[in-house]
Amino acid sequence: MAATETDDLLRFITCGSVDDGKSTLLGRLLHDAGMLPEDHLATLACDSARQHPDAPGKLDFALLTDGLAAEREQGITIDVAYRYFHTAHRSFIVADCPGHEQYTRNMATGASTASLAVVLVDARKGLLAQTRRHSYICALMGIGQVILAVNKMDLVGFDPTVFEGIRAAYQALADQLGIARVVAIPVVATDGDHIATRSPRMPWHIGPTLLQALEEAPLPQPVDGDFRLPIQLVVRPHQDYRGYAGIVEAGCVQVGDEVLVQPGKTTARVATLHVAGEPADAARRGQAVMLTLQPDVQAGRGQVLASAGAPCPEASQFACHLLWMGEEPMLPGRAYDLLQGTGRVRARITAIKHKVDVHTQAPLAARRLELNEVGACNLDLDHDIAFEPFTSNPALGGFVLVDLQSRATVACGRLDFALRRSANIHWQHMDVDKAIRSHAKAQKPLCVWFTGLSGSGKSTIANLLEQRLTALGHHTYLLDGDNVRHGLNNDLGFTAEARVENIRRLAEVAHLMVDAGLVVLVCAISPFAAEREFARERFEPGEFVEVYIDTPLAECELRDPKGLYRKARKGLLANFTGIDSPYEPPADADVHLMTLDASPQLQADRLAAWLAGRITP
């Protein structure tokens, strides 16, 4: 999320729609600021001559930042190109961000560390959809100031009324988005007009040049507030030393200060402090520190050291805004890893309150979020985290979501506030627990999860297995996916979103049954690997067995006990697994049964024998 700087260094991005001239403007800015060595200029001249043989001697400044071959071939920026440069007044790190909607995630990456955005607009086109999208994302990422560069003024005859119309329209957008500061500048990036020097072709512009605006832009102020240190690393060179390393994200700390380890209620005092490897009495925001505590309490990566007198709030349920960056849609109920601060926790989007029309900022009803869409959502975590709203502390209020299967980052977002029910719901202690219930039944509780295509034989084998286990004196219950849809899940359809929720409910019910000491058999197609993994994680190690009933699709269609495949092939049944909805086979199931190799009875007997050691105390 948006960074704040303590030194005279400004991080900014260039963004806007495709072909507005971002790369050209940045290349020209580096050139006019005197930041191009002679060898770079010589290389640029050669590259420009090859790229534009019909314009000898003309430099194509976009080639300085469009480093990927694909970008040069297509004439667009794909990746985020970072450049460092400086003037006599200030140092800069700039991220040249892609303009095409397909690469919005790359633009969000660049914005995540910036405190100012240079938004380019083609004077001929005015504000476009992508201009509005990028501006919305800048506001989402906490960027509060924009330099509006109205480019290609030469193509509109340097008309000041065109510039003023675009400036007014963007100011209205900025006011709507909460962007506090906008400086508008008319420019011609290819010729350098108002880039580093004033342009005689636009004498009516009395404001700064682009370079002056960058040099005069206010630097972000340090986050005010109390001491906050997300623990990055626990250092234990020997058993008598335990140090906690990280970057102070807010406030300051001194030796002797009382701190709280969060989440939790453990307090201790700072015994020693090192800043950048040197002993120190105090440290302030932005400094990398190592400290030890007295007494020597237990803490780990992902926890936060906070001022004991003013700790962070803690919660597990939040209202948030997020930008979806995954190729596959975001489905409510699906589990993801949430990375916030230095911590990682399992998370689910429980509800999409609305998605945002980035053109008008109007809320729209939605059941899923597609690539590059922004939504206001409710977020549920596996356990409490220490946090602060993004507007107060971006380091503890920003997060990303990571897909459990691909490990790809699929969303970035901001925590707005904790939901009230998060603080009002607590676990109620019960004296009769799972161990007592299991002992009374003389068995180890277990969840046996059957997955496979419709017609593969899941229910048949599970039914025979339950008969076998019951005959052996075990206490069982069979949760069949079809049967549950008559009651608990009768409000769910068969869309991807509904399938995710269906499996979530089945997993929660099975979890309660295992807590009751039962051996519960769950039969559900459960087509998505992510939801099967979510189900497994609801149980303690050794309490979950995934059984893959592997039957070829052709065989399932021949059996077709309920006539569903025939309906699906005729187009009468939508979202049917194996036909027009995918099935993701388990990559490493605990038990893999090939149903064409043996009868259902023999498969059930073999499975009962395999489970015997897991059920018997």
Image: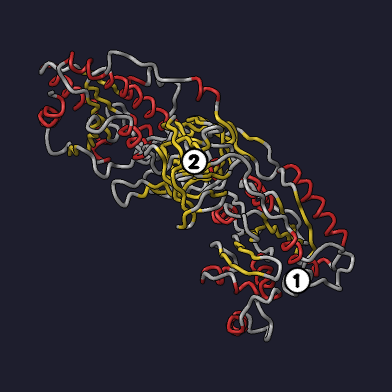
| Position of residue 5 measured from the top left corner of the image (x, y, whole percent) | 62, 55
- Snapshot quadrant of residue 355: top right
Residue carrying label 1: 196
Residue 609 higher or lower than 369, as above or below: above
In whole angstroms, how far apart are the C-alphas of marks 1 and 2? 51 Å
In the displayed orientation, state which residue is furthest to the right: 204
**What number of labels is visible?**
2
| Position of residue 416 measured from the top left corner of the image (x, y, whole percent) | 59, 35
Residue carrying label 2: 256
For mark 1, give the secondary structure: loop
In percent of the image, x 29 and y 23: which residue is there?
480
Residue 141 placement, left or right of 463? right
Along the line of sight, the residue nearer the viewer: 250 or 446: 250
Residue 166 placement, left or right of 28? right
Residue 13 appears in the figure: no
Which amino acid type corresponds to the residue marked 2 in the rendered image?
A: Gly
In percent of the image, x 51 and y 71: which residue is there?
69
| Position of residue 57 measured from the top left corner of the image (x, y, whole percent) | 68, 86
